[in-house]
Amino acid sequence: MTGTTLAQKIIARAAGRQNVTPGEVVTVGVDLAMIHDSGGPRRVEPILRELGVGLWDASKVVLISDHFVPGDTEEGARILDLTRDWASKRGVAFHDGQGICHVVLPERGHLKPGMLVVGGDSHSPTGGAFGAYMFGVGATEMAGVLATGEIWLKVPETILIEWSKQLRPGVVAKDIMLALCGRLGMDGGRYQAVEYTGDAIAALSMQERMTLSNMAAELGAQVGLIAPDATTYAFLDAAGSGAVEDASLRTDRDASLGEHHVFNAAELAPQVAAPHSPANAMAVEDAPRISLDIAYIGACTGAKYEDLKNAAAILRGHSLAPGMTLLIAPSSKRDQDRAKKEGIMRVFEEAGARILPNACGICAGYGADRLAAESRCISSTARNFKGRMGDPTAEVWLASPLTVAASAIAGEIADPRDYLHRREVA
């Protein structure tokens, strides 16, 4: 008997089946639905009202406000009021202004391995880092999920992406993803199930793994899975999820794969992606040393606690380049509080950074700090599409938080390993 993939196992359980085959269209039960203030109540409530139905199970719905936070515009304040009112009336779990949904959801213990989860945002594949089959849908499909607790999907093939050996100092998960976008392209995932594996992946922390799963969206995958292990369960135990270890939640050795890519993590250099696509990736030493105006460390992809810690390790003891603006938007309030307690936020402040709210902010084109015309930014975000972060004439280079920090010091695209080496020598 041929083995099955992790994706097949989760989908089969959700479909009430013993097994499923790639290419089949099945109806699955949803274990959890996540929505936010932008695509949530204001979009789905009119549909539910038109259908004359309520929520299939309020205990399985999580609402998070993160797009219009802090509500400093008339429209933002109105949408946040609507969101809060909806949460109260519908009786769902609600995390208001606590950070970006993809970070808050697992840190508050809502995810467990083996769950099938639907999110109202394109970066919902982040949940795959925890061994959950989580993907994003639009408001109309989400309204259907909220009304019925079900959704249909086409059982995917699994594209196994294996990273052998170990990453070198100065190289992190964001570099892996930019390299993959460059090598495989933004449709390399073919809307299938990408699964990350290998020694380099096993050595990563949960927040680093979240970056990999998050940016499965940039590869064009439906999900970005990582089989749960001791690291996963330790994180979930600390988050109070109540997850129980399940050794079966992994791809069998004899499972049929759509593709299998193998890369050597020890050969990977820090990456940057030129405007206006993550697929325009290159090693940092091959990038032009262009001058920069803004360095942005933010987003679910690039401003979690460990991202902040890594960036601070580069910045400590340095000042910003003349004319450089450094913006820091921690992904969650909890991560910011921890960073503050450990002195990490003080490093940013002493370097001259400005701290922004725990929200999606300019990554998604929200807020007063959107990029101005002709500005040039290096950013820890997942996307650098033209006009996404502000004026269409602005240029955005993507990089890891370490590379963003090094570039903020240099005033141009810089290699973070240079600063790590200087610190080691000192």
Image (spheres, helix red, strand yellow):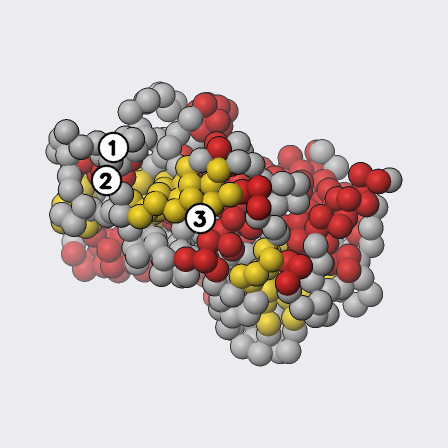
- Amino acid type at circle 3 is Asn
Q: Quadrant of the C terminus?
A: top right
Where does the image place residue 116, in percent across and percent down from the top left?
A: 28, 39
Q: From the top left corner, tell me how far across and down residue 361 is, in percent.
A: 55, 59
In the depicted structure, whether residue 228 falls above or below residue 101: above
- SS of the residue under disc 2: loop
Whether residue 179 can be seen here: yes
Q: Nearer the viewer, mark 1 or mark 3?
A: 1
Residue 83 horizontal side relative to residue 138, left or right = right
How far apart marks 1 and 3 lie (CA) works out to 27 Å
Q: Position of residue 263 (x, y in %)?
A: 47, 45
Local secondary structure at mark 3: helix
The structure residue drawn at horizontal position 72% and vertical position 70%, both measured from the top left corner, is 291
Residue at which label 1 appears: 254
Looking at the image, tell me whether mark 1 or mark 3 is earlier in sequence order.
3
Label 2 crowd (10 A; few <14 / some 14-19 / many >=20): some
Q: CA distance from mark 2 to mark 3?
A: 24 Å
**Marks 1,3: beta carbons within 8 A:** no
Q: Is residue 222 above or below residue 18?
A: below
Type of amino acid at the residue the image marks with label 1:
Asp
Estimate how packed mark 1 is, as few (under 14), some (14 to 19) or many (20 or more) residues with alpha carbons within 10 Å.
few
Q: Residue at x 34, y 54 (%)?
A: 189
Foreground residue among 164 and 303: 164
At which x and y percent is residue 40? 35, 54
Earlier sequence position, callout 2 versus callout 3: 3
Q: Residue at x 25, y 32 (%)?
A: 254
Pointer 2 residue = 256
